[in-house]
Image: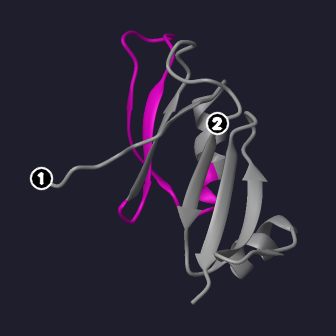
Amino acid sequence: MDDEVIPVLRVADADAAVRWYERLGFTRQWEHRFEPGFPAFVEVARGRVRLFLSEHAGDARPDTLVYLRRDDVDAVAADFGLPVGELPWAREVELRDPDGNRLRIGTPTD
């Protein structure tokens, strides 16, 4: 197995968060609750990119920033109705999920 880093993002409502991340092409992989009615811990994935979405208060801080490299920043920006920024290292757009977590999505410049 290769080493892998998976960011954990704090969410208030895992189902709502999963629906939002589906707009970016992520799909729910699995969900865990210690008992019915307890906070959810969910994995979403898009290709090799994985995120953990946690309703557990101590797992992550709100307002986390995750950087994602994608080859289609223009399509993402258009879907969310946002402009693309031109930076020396990439063309980028920044999104906020329903819980205030920030996703900076960039297509590297050559």
Mark 2 and mark 1: Cα distance apart in space: 27 Å
Residue drawn at x 65%, y 27% is 13
Q: Position of residue 63 (x, y in %)?
A: 71, 33
Q: Position of residue 100 (x, y in %)?
A: 76, 36
Q: Amino acid at mark 1?
A: Met
Of residue 40 and residue 37, the one placed in the foreground of this image is: 40
Q: Which mark is residue 1?
A: 1
Residue 90, x across and y down, in percent: 66, 76
Q: Quadrant of the C terminus?
A: bottom right
Specify whether 53 is left or right of 65.
left
Q: Residue at x 64, y 75 (%)?
A: 89
Q: Is-magenta flag for residue 30?
A: yes
Q: Secondary structure at mark 1?
A: loop
In the rendered structure, does residue 45 fall within the stretch colored magenta?
yes
Specify start and end residues of the magenta stretch as a single range: 21-48
Hey, which residue is sitting farthest bottom in the picture?
A: 110
Disc 2 on helix, strand or loop? loop
How many marks on residues?
A: 2
Q: Could you tell whether 41 is left or right of 110 in the image?
A: left
How many residues crowd mark 2 within 10 Å: few (<14), some (14–19), many (20+)? some
Q: Residue visible at 73% across and 33% down?
A: 99
- Place residue 33 in its image quadrant: top left
Instruction: Place residue 101 in its image quadrant.
Output: top right
74 on left or right of 30: right
Q: Position of residue 1 (x, y in %)?
A: 12, 53
Identify which residue, 68 or 16, lies in the foreground: 68
Tell me what residue is drawn at x 81 percent, y 74 percent.
84
Q: Is residue 40 above or below residue 9?
A: above
Q: Amino acid at mark 2?
A: Thr
Q: Which mark is residue 64?
A: 2
Q: Earlier in the sequence, mark 2 or mark 1?
A: 1
